[in-house]
Image: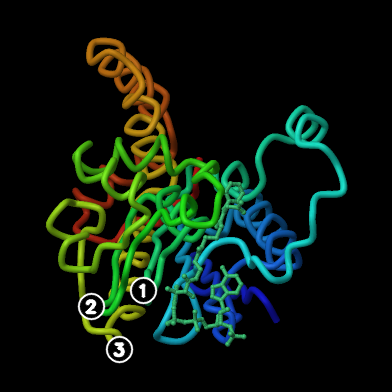
Amino acid sequence: MGVEFTKEDHVAYITLNRPDAMNSLDPESVTKLAEIWSEVQNDDDIRVSVLTGAGEKSFCTGTDMKKTPPPAECMASIWLREGQPIVPHMKMWKPIICAINGYAVGGGMEMALACDLRIASSNAKFGLTEVKVASLAGLNGTQCMPRAIPQAVAMKMLLTGEMIDAKEAHRVGLISDVVEPGELMDLAKKLALRIASNAPLSVKAAKQAAVMGLEMPLEHGIAFSHLLWGVLRDTEDRKEGFTAFAEKRAPEWKGR
Ligand SMILES: CC(C)(COP(=O)(O)OP(=O)(O)OC[C@H]1O[C@@H](n2cnc3c(N)ncnc32)[C@H](O)[C@@H]1OP(=O)(O)O)[C@@H](O)C(=O)NCCC(=O)NCCSC(=O)/C(=C/c1ccccc1)CC(=O)O
């Protein structure tokens, strides 16, 4: 199967599973991913996701350039009907952790950029290589890379199409952690469980405030986050969080 999906302890695990093709995205995988992200978004039992690739060589190398047929429809009709593929489906306030287990290239790099946390194995490599195949990092790469890392490094990546290794990616802040390949999923799970143990509405609000706030002047961002705090103030979970603290017990979240 092109994409595997399991869930456990409020965590969704999504694995791109075409290691022989470097987990590149063939049309079936793109469709499957869209279905999975929709399920993640609508399933209240899921609080956080881990996106990774099968094997130890590649997270994802973007579009499967051998299996993707020429478009059947012009871009305008697709765009005006449903927007871009892949990344909009990842637009949700539940956090997504990307566990980058090898190459994160082209659309694979762009999916990683659409995630909230990026962790990688020491053999990972990162690149927006689309210019090498006469295309463009048109999902989000041209916009998100310069926002994620220093502009000079982002421009070098975008214009040369060259890759950087995990050490450099860590140095420039593209990823938060680098571990040995065998330790990657343990770290992803640990982080996911840590997030899932927090109050689900608070986690979503923190992401919303941070992501939307990035596009606002500071004062507006602070006002917006204060409003979000107000939205959370009267939730059952906030009462439960304070009570559990006072009673020295673990809280039981209801997500309301
Ligand atoms: C990543 C590599 C440098 C690895 O090289 P290596 O030598 O280690 O391994 P290979 O022998 O090259 O790969 C093994 C096997 O996998 C096949 N493979 C790898 N990547 C792809 C791919 N993207 N599509 C199809 N097949 C792939 C490879 O052919 C081998 O198969 P075999 O010969 O054994 O049958 C190297 O693999 C590499 O450079 N890969 C290509 C990376 C790349 O250029 N990615 C960009 C693709 S374009 C894209 O992602 C776009 C995204 C997008 C943008 C906007 C909107 C939608 C999508 C642009 C677009 O679609 O236009």
Please, what secondary structure does the residue beneath circle 3 have? helix
- Ligand 1 closer than 8 Å to label 1 CB: no
Disc number at residue 182?
A: 3
Dot 2: within a 10 Å radius of its alpha carbon, few (fewer than 14), some, or many (20 or more) residues? many
Q: Nearer the viewer, residue 33 or 49?
A: 33
Above/below status of 214 relative to 177: above
Q: Residue at x 28, y 40 (%)?
A: 155
Looking at the rendered image, the disc whose residue lies closer to the viewer, 3 or 1, is 3
**Amino acid type at image mark 2:** Ser
Identify the amino acid type marked 1: Lys
Provide the secondary structure element on which disc 1 rests. helix
Residue situated in front as seen by the camera: 161 or 73: 161
Task: Give the mark nearer the N terminus: 3 vs 1.
Answer: 3
- The alpha-carbon separation of the residues under discs 3 and 1 comes to 13 Å
Residue 178 lies, with reference to residue 117, above or below; the image says below
Residue at x 47%, y 50% (from the top left corner): 131
At a point 80% along the width and 50% down the height, the residue shown is: 71
Disc nearer the start of the sequence (2/1): 2
Q: Earlier in the sequence, mark 3 or mark 2?
A: 2
Name the spot of residue 92 as percent of width and height, x first.
Answer: 53, 42
Numbered tag placed on residue 122 in the rendering: 2
Locate the N terminus and report the quarter of the image it occupies.
bottom right
Element under label 2?
Answer: loop
User: Which mark is nearer the camera, 2 or 1?
Assistant: 2
**Label 3 – label 2 distance at C-alpha:** 10 Å
Task: Report the residue marked by disc 1.
Answer: 189
Q: Quadrant of residue 105?
A: bottom left
